[in-house]
Amino acid sequence: MTAGLLILGIFLVAAGLMFFRLLPAMLALPIMAVAITGIEVATGRLGIDDLSRAVLADGATRLADAMVIAMLGGMLSSLMQKAGVAESIVHRGAELAGDNPWTVSLIMLGIATLLFTTVGGLGAVIMLGTIVLPILASMGVREHISAGILLFGISLGGLLNAGNWTMYRAVLGMDVSLVSGYALSLFGVAVAGGIGFGTVGFLGAGAFRIGRASAARAFAWLAALAGLAFALGAVADRGLDLASVARWGVGGLGLGLAGVVLWRIVAGRTRDGRVHWSAYAIPLVPLALILVYGLPFVPAFLAGLVYAMASTYRKGILNLTSRAIIEGSASVAPAVALMIGIGMLLSAILGPTAAGPGAYWRAAHPPGTEWPVLADMKPLLQVVTPTTLAGYVGVFTLLGPLALYRGPLNIWGLGYGVGGVLLATGVPPGAVMGLLMSLGVIQGV
């Protein structure tokens, strides 16, 4: 009981230091891992060798898959920015949006969402903000509405960023289809929130207007979506496999895009250096390969890089790609450092993995033996962990603000550590993912 209370005390102290910006998360996480394991070393239940091998060495490589995918995502993001694709998407969207502020705002929301399914990092946020915010300001959109739309778009894109899904898969051991399915459901709710925010903001400012032409276009889009839904339902009623239909449809579009890109290269239409519309599909390539074809993350992102090189082909593309690989990898270095610390904390709480450097510990103990830290924490946490749906929703809704900055429910703070503790108390992995991803939207906006 005493050891469990001391471990909880370490959690609270570290959370406070991170929240008040007295200790960076990338330092706090490994320090916590050492301190928590050190308590068990002091009691004699673990040794120094366990601390170095089963916690530090095992934890440092625990999230290796997520680290590799983060680096590949950073490379793809950097290439899109260096080739001018991201900037071109924003400008082209603004040209097509017309002169209605509400319509332009929704287009900017959609563009930010599209871009941040792939791009990321502070540089991408600055690039997008320096383009989107002046466009909205020139349309007379008020500052707080413009900023809110931009932040909603960035957060919405993060929900569909396949690279972010790998952390839930690696930490919680969940199937990709479950993670992506919940992300898509949550995306629908968050889209409604983003559109509602912009619409209410315009109404409050007395600036909402929509002409007959815009109303007709909106009605046409709704009718088209309703017709598509009806058609898909009819296909399902006839017993046809919707997944196969999606694979054939996406495959046909992919072959068409590949043909256009190849024709431009062979015909020498790439010499003007301008961004072709085929490059706008770059963010969708890895997403489609993962969702529609179930391709593993690494080959999906590699395919995205190859398509990005081909669709932005120009003189010096190899040098441009080389720079993007180097700078993209560097841009995600802080995230990789955090993943190392998160892995160490998880190994300190849940015990070493079955195939990592700490596998010896499990081999040396009878099957079913609990890791000492886990055994000490479980009795305390089972008392306060919600066991009903109403309790789960109510408690974590009230605790939502703890996801802000590096709070204990922020996935880039102590969130995954808290998630690991909840798993140990019997909370299903899906419920842990649900609360972390949902509160991640709050933190993102």
Image (cartoon, helix red, strand yellow):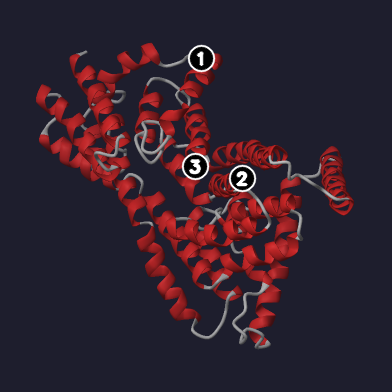
Sequence-first tag of 2 and 1? 2
The residue at the point 59 percent across, 50 percent down is: 294
Residue 63: give x, y in percent of width and height: 36, 46
Q: Give the left or right position of residue 78, taking residue 2 as reference.
A: right
Residue 122: give x, y in percent of width and height: 43, 56
Mark 3 burial class by Cα count in 10 Å: few <14, some 14-19, many 20+: some
Q: Amino acid at mark 1?
A: Gly
Residue 260: give x, y in percent of width and height: 70, 75
Give SS at disc 2: helix
Q: Are marks 2 and 1 in contact (CB under 8 Å)?
A: no
Sequence-first tag of 1 and 3? 1
Residue 10 visible in image: yes
Q: Quadrant of the N terminus?
A: top left
The residue at the point 28 percent across, 30 percent down is: 16
Q: Give the left or right position of residue 81, taking residue 14 as reference.
A: right
Residue 145's tag is: 2
Q: Amino acid at mark 3?
A: Gly
Mark 1 burial class by Cα count in 10 Å: few <14, some 14-19, many 20+: few
Residue 391's tag is: 1
Foreground: disc 2 or disc 1: 2
Residue 300 visible in image: no
Q: Are marks 3 and 2 in contact (CB under 8 Å)?
A: no
Q: Are marks 1 and 3 in contact (CB under 8 Å)?
A: no
Q: Give the left or right position of residue 255, taking residue 124 as reference.
A: right
Q: Give the left or right position of residue 219, taking residue 406 as reference.
A: right
The residue at the point 11 percent across, 22 percent down is: 43
The residue at the point 76 percent across, 44 percent down is: 208
Residue that label 3 marks:
444
Foreground: disc 3 or disc 2: 2
Distance CA(mark 2)–CA(mark 1):
34 Å
